[in-house]
Each structure stands twice: as structure tokens, then as C-alpha cells.
Amino acid sequence: MDDQRRTDGGIDDARIETRAIHAGQEPDPETGALMTPIHANSTYEQDGPGDHRGFEYSRTGNPTRTDLEENLASLESGSHARCFASGMGAINTVLNLLSAGDHVVAGDDVYGGTHRILTQVYDQYDIETTFVDTTDLDAVREAVREETALIWIETPTNPLMNVNDIAALSSIAADADALCAVDNTFATPYLQRPLEHGADIVVQSLTKYLGGHSDVIGGALIVDDADLDERLGFYQNSVGATPGPFDCFLVLRGTKTLPVRMDRHCENAAALAEWLDAHEDVDRVYYPGLDSHPQHELAAEQMDDFGGMLSFAFDGTLEEASTVVRETEVFTLAESLGGVESLIEQPAAMTHAAIPREERLAAGLTDGLIRVSVGIEHIEDLKKDLQTAFEAARE
Ligand SMILES: *Cc1c(COP(=O)(O)O)cnc(C)c1O
């Protein structure tokens, strides 16, 4: 594995905090500029027909993007990475590997955009998906068919923070000659590296923690297999959902501080989870770091810490929970996650509003459910903000 790694500078063996800053990034050989330049450029001079210096055209490859791809490959313990204009662009490229007649098994609580592209886009190309509870390994085994070519999971999932067993699901996929793709957006490579547990493809929405500052949309695929990377590269170039160099630069800025940001996200989320767990206005807290979480032990094995995302069931009606999310001042009412600032949202009225109420309740998405992306502000300000909002909802 290591000899395939494209990262240079002798830092392959360094710890992730060091690789986050240095992997894929060397001072510019011409000017000595420390930071990767923004190569705002479409085409490249050739010394003779076909005789170029590694780059021909920026859809196919751009030096700023290459530095980001090498950085991400290193962080995810992979050999290669490919970047895209959005997380959905990355997800689409995995699905480009499939052919008509193929079958997909996916978690029944995957990201809404993933559910939509499977059921409303790939469905029309005769690629069928079975959605199952991927925490139930027998249910996954039963859903697998002769034609199954891909098992798709997320962990932790949104918004109930279910934790899926990457090693077990990867081995079910391998037994079926299918690929296992893991959307690692919630955990990030700092907390969890699915390729080390046997997954074939890691998916990242760079928009979230890797960018980290809510100022860019991007996606990535990371693999540890040169042939698979080449197939993905073919679709990356053929479909063309590639990111511009400015966006790549922003994400490269973000990955340098990923470890320090994640440490604070985790510390704040753990403290907030405990505070909420003890709060009289809260029925239940969903956070993999709590002993009460159904897959707490698996999370402790598979992850290095428990992340910055949590949900809780506010003890109240849909309207009262709406008041809570409207009244917070430090937490901003918004979808998305993973930025330095805390965000709050109400799944029943926002991200999951399209699901019929009965179905939503059966899945545990109660009217009072509130999801937070815990930022890196001071923890006491976060608690105080929620306390004030809870009191407003009770008035
Ligand atoms: C946001 C998100 C995506 C999609 O990424 P975009 O950058 O918005 O296209 C995919 N998976 C998960 C888990 C996400 O949170």
C-alpha cells in the first residue's frame, strides 16, 4: 500500500496532524512560495505534440487540484484521490461505475441527496436500489443479490447518528464481489479511515468539515487501488464535474487545521451531549459518545473520537421545537454542517420534511427532534444559548 502512495517529501509515515499540513504540498519549485498557488489556468504549453509536463487541460488535471488530491489520499490512508465540484458530483462518479441491471444496497438513512440520485436518477437507467437498516447485518445479507454491485453506507448517519460496522459491511460486499463505498463526511479522516477497515471507496463532501469554514462546495473520492482510481478518473474527466482551483485552494486551507478543529468539535459535542442528556426538557440524546448510544462500543472501536454532530429529542410539539431553533442566537438556523460555527436545524420541518409523518415517526424522527452541528465556540455560550431558547419555547 505504501509504495503506491503519491505523497512525497518523506512524510508518509508522519502522524495525521503533520500530514494534514504537509502531504501533497511542497514549496513552489520556481518561487519558493510556501502555499500551493491557485493555478487559474485552463491549458498548458506542450514542448512537442503530446510532450507536456504532466498537465494538458484543467478539467483533466490542475496542479492546485492535484495537491489537494494528494493531501486527501494521505489523510484517508489511500493511494489516490479525485476531487469534484460537490459531494454529489463525487457520489455520481461512484454510480458511473455501475451498468444497467446492476443492483445497489444502501442504508435506509443515507443523505437525502444520495437517496434522491439513486431513486430518481439511476433508477431510470435500470439500476435498482434496496434500502435497508445497515446496522442489521442479516438484513444487509438478505438484501444482497446476484446483481448487487455496490453496498453504500454512511457512518455515523444523519440525523440519528447510527453507527455502521465498516469492516463487517465491507466483508459482506467482498463476498458478493461488490464494492463497498463509505460516505465518511460526518466522521472525517481524522476520526475514521474506512479504507483501513476494508472499504473500497471513501466519499467526502468537502463542503463540510474538510473545508470547515462554510465557504466552499466540494467533494472527493479516495481509494487504495490504482485500477479503481483510473476508472474513477475516466468518469471524472468524461463527466467533468471538477472543482476550480480557487475552491481547491480553500479546501487545502481547511485540511491544514482539520485535526485541531475536530478536537474542539468533539470536546464541545461531548460536553453538550452530557448536558442535554441531563436536561429535563430533553427526552433523548443521539450521540455515539454516550454510553446509552446503541452502537457506542462499535463507535469506540472504529472511530478515534465521536465527532461534532448530535441530535436530541426536545420534549415538545413541532411548533415548540421550531421556537427553539428560531430563538437561538449563537447557533444559526441552517442546514449543512461541519463549519467552525454552530448550526441548528429541525429535521421534521427541514431536511426530512418530505418524508410522510407516519413514516418519519416510525424511523424515530420525532416532531421535536433537533439536530446540531456543534461548532468550536465556547461551550458555556452554546449551553446558555440553548437554555434561553428552551425557555422561550416553554413560554
Ligand atoms: C452534504 C453531504 C453530501 C453532499 O455533499 P455536497 O457537497 O452538498 O454536494 C453527501 N453526504 C453527506 C453525508 C453530506 O452531509
Image (cartoon, rainbow, N blue to C red):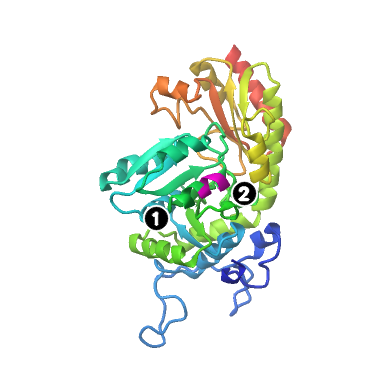
Q: Which mark is residue 93?
A: 1
Q: Mark 2 — residue?
A: 192
Residue 275 seen by the camera: yes
Q: Hey, what amino acid is under mark 2? A: Gln
* Residue at the (46%, 35%) spot, across then down: 139
Give the image location of residue 189, x and y in percent: 60, 52
Question: Would residue 275 appear left or right of 225 to someone viewing this image?
Answer: right
Look at the picture and state if 63 lies above or below 329: below
Q: Nearer the viewer, residue 305 or 262?
A: 305
Instruction: Tell me if residue 169 is in the magenta stretch.
Output: yes
Q: Nearer the viewer, residue 172 or 299?
A: 172
Question: Would residue 72 appear left or right of 146 to someone viewing this image?
Answer: right
Q: Hey, what amino acid is under mark 1? A: Thr
Q: Residue furthest toward the bottom? A: 48
* Residue at the (66%, 62%) spot, across then down: 19
Residue 76: name its quadrant.
bottom right
Look at the picture and state if 86 lies above or below 273: below
Magenta span: 167-171
Q: Nearer the viewer, residue 292 or 217?
A: 292
Q: In 3D space, how far apart are the residues under numbered discs 2 and 1 (Cα atoms)?
A: 22 Å
Give the image location of residue 192, x and y in percent: 62, 49
Mark found first going from the N terminus, 2 or 1: 1
